[in-house]
Image: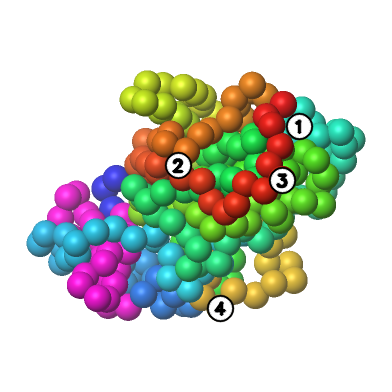
Amino acid sequence: MPISLHHLRAGSTSRWAVCHDGEWGELDGTLADLLAVPLGQARAVVEAAAREAGGDMPGEETLPPVDQQEVWAAGVTYLRSRDGRKEESGHGALYDHVYDSDRPEIFFKSSPWRVVGDRDAVGIRADSGWDVPEAEIGLVLNATGEVFGYTLANDMSSRSIEGENPLYLPQAKIYDRSCAVGPAIVPSWAVDPGPFPIGLRVLREGREAYAGTTSTSAMARGFEDLAGWLFRALSFPAGVILLTGTGVVPDADFTVRPGDTIEITSPALGTLTNPVVAIGAATGAKAQP
């Protein structure tokens, strides 16, 4: 990544920094500040910090690349995602309709304080027996809906819960440690706008338990179209992150387990790595199909 934005912990505080060809420079301000102004103005701030980069990383560890931004997500944007949702559900026609309709599925995914970053643990619900990662490109959108940058994301999903009833989607998607974002934000002007190849691996006891690849070229909807729908009746003064859906869906005989490690990779955006832990109580858990 020739230029990237990072959220770093520095003692008891946090700060934003730019990494340019391996050299670091501090940003004067936050991501919310950058996303509150027009794209050209934010670009000037980032490029000025990149020109002055020359030191070591100004922090002890990386944090999720968010501060005040909610995370939203789009679903059924790939044919494989539509087919996967039909596999898990007795309501297949519902997903056909969403895939083919003008209006996309867009749902709230995470408050900023619930987002986890690179190397932090993601969760699977203890009351679910069938859980998968969803490897996605995240759009970092400013207050007017312009694409400020791109990042990698994992929209963890309980297939058993959503498959039981589509109205359970909030429980299948929104819980502690269900959303990973990172490792950094690559500015939109510093990278080709796509298509982005995406790779997903699940490691179990050091061995590859699952691997799959896709590309955003397989999406049925474009980035700008999805962003336009998100902003149609919502405002985001500090910007927002929009996950754009997944084209890598493991077969029905696969589920992630506590102790697994999930890796999501795209050459221009880096690698997002997260170990898996169980979240919540197992009361009422159902067996994997």
Q: Secondary structure at mark 2?
A: strand
Q: Which residue is mark 2?
A: 276
Numbered disc in front, either 2 or 1: 2
Residue type at the position of mark 4: Pro
Q: CA distance from mark 1 to mark 4?
A: 37 Å
Q: Earlier in the sequence, mark 1 or mark 4?
A: 1
Q: Quadrant of the C terminus?
A: top right
Q: Is 271 situated above or below 46?
A: above
Q: Is 76 situated above or below 202?
A: below
Give me the disc on residue 208.
Answer: none
Q: Nearer the viewer, residue 50 or 207?
A: 207
Residue 214: % across, % down: 54, 29
Q: Earlier in the sequence, mark 1 or mark 3?
A: 1
Q: CA distance from mark 2 to mark 3?
A: 21 Å
Q: Are marks 2 and 3 in contact (CB under 8 Å)?
A: no
Q: Which residue is mark 3?
A: 284
**Crowd rating for badge 2 (residues with CA inside 10 Å; few <14, some 14–19, many 20+):** many
Q: Residue at x 19, y 62 (%)?
A: 60
Residue type at the position of mark 2: Val
User: Toward which corner of the image does residue 58 lie, by quadrant?
Assistant: bottom left
Residue 240: % across, % down: 55, 66
Q: Which residue is mark 1?
A: 88
Numbered disc in front, either 1 or 4: 1
Q: Secondary structure at mark 1?
A: helix
- Whether residue 72 is visible: yes
Task: Based on the picture, tell me whether residue 16 belongs to the magenta stretch.
Answer: yes
| Magenta part of the chain | 4-29
User: Toward which corner of the image does residue 156 lie, by quadrant?
Assistant: top right
Q: Secondary structure at mark 4?
A: loop
